Amino acid sequence: MQGEDLSREPSLLIFAGWLIDGTGTPAESCVIAEVQAGHFSSIQPAANLDSLKAANRPFLDLSHCTVLPVLSDCHVHLAWSGTTDRSQRDLQFHQPRGPAGAAISGNLERHLAHGILAVRDGGDSGNHALRFKQTHPRNPYVPVCIRAAGTVWHKPGRYGSILGPALPAGKTLADCLRSASPGADHVKIVNSGLNSLAVFGRQTPPQFEYVELRDAVNTAARAGMPVMVHANGVRAVREAIEAGCRSIEHGYFMGRENLEYLAERRVYWVPTAYSMKAYVRGLDAGTIEQETARRNYDHQVEQLAHARAMGVPIALGTDAGGFGIHHGSSCIEELRVLVEAGFPVEEALACAASRSARLLGLQNEIGRIIRGMPASFVVVRGGISSLPGSLESPAMIFVRGERVPLTRYVTPGSAFHR
Ligand SMILES: [Zn+2]
């Protein structure tokens, strides 16, 4: 049309049946969103489609779909698959660079296929995730952002050899952090054991003395790196919060006082609760191990309900790559756990959207659908009640206003990687 300022035309105009903005507020139905130059330029309620039809403007009709922000998974192990085959698990813990790189590529595609655009890696003994990030330019068709840990240290004789080396004799954790892993985004520290599948609620002591842990966290902070800490049990969690860690990973059996402390200090909790359900599903029925995993799971769901009531900052992490925890799809399972613990689905999604994005330092890139934010979003079929299951096969994914051609890049999982 003559005289009309074409620069004001949105590059994309959307009518969404439902919109979840990623902050935890309830979904809105019938919303018109405009995208210009890759960003949301306006988001407005609409009574119905008629106004758009009457204006005779081309638009994307998503009236039978829900639009939500792209998500982040704050705890993954990209180099590993979620296989439950013990011998394959052992093999992948020590796999060479080539197969590890192929596994990482496939796993990034799986994340993207479920609407996940950022992952935080918790390490592997070959440092494959960090090396992959450093040697592979971001694939424009699989634009998943990787936050990678440096070398993951543990105390000699304690849990952690699948993640990295034991601390050499005579060296402190801070000494090791000072020299290792240029280019890492964060530091991962292992400060407790695994959860026992033989004895319910058995707690292991912290791996590091409090002062050593605190000095390490301060060393990391001087290098601009936050610390994610593997910690289960009352003391290991307490000391990790006290030392200034940015997020507590797992946090099983941490107890109410620690939950209150997390809320007060605004330290993130990444509960990885589905990992126990994955054990329940993957272990032999009727065994002590399966029963203990079930009790661990129930206990973690109780902690989650308390945490929600207390206002603990919770970010979603799956531990994908762990036993029975598949990249991408496990995000849906972890969302289901949050819903089981009493979170409305919008709040559960906020843990994977705005809260996860903030933990990853990506809060201005992804995680919220508000005016001015980059238009990176997922379209799933159906309304709110279809979530989180509808994330199993999103209808569309947009990154900065551009549609990502999903079908071409999603590969069916091989036996090894599923
Ligand atoms: Zn992990």
Image (cartoon, grey):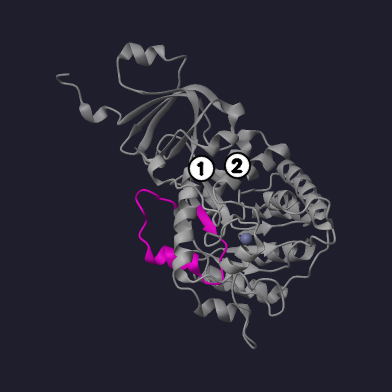
Spot occupied by residue 292 in the image (x, y as percentages of width and height): 82, 55
- Where does the image place residue 3, in percent across and percent down from the top left? 15, 21
Q: Mark 1 points at which residue?
A: 114
Residue 87 relative to residue 178: left or right: right
Neighbor class of circle 2 (other Cα within 10 Å; few <14, some 14-19, many 20+) is: many
Q: What residue type is labelled 1?
A: His
- From this view, report whether residue 110 is shown above or below residue 370: below
The residue depicted at 55 percent of the width and 33 percent of the height is: 390
Give the residues drawn in magenta, as a range: 119-144
Residue 75 screen position, x and y as percent: 58, 56
Q: In which quarter of the image is the N terminus?
A: top left
Name the quadrant containing residue 204. bottom right
**Where 186 falls versus 166 (above or below)?**
above
Q: Does 369 appear in magenta?
A: no
Which residue was labeled with disc 2? Answer: 332
- Asked if 256 appears above or below 113 in the picture, the reply is below
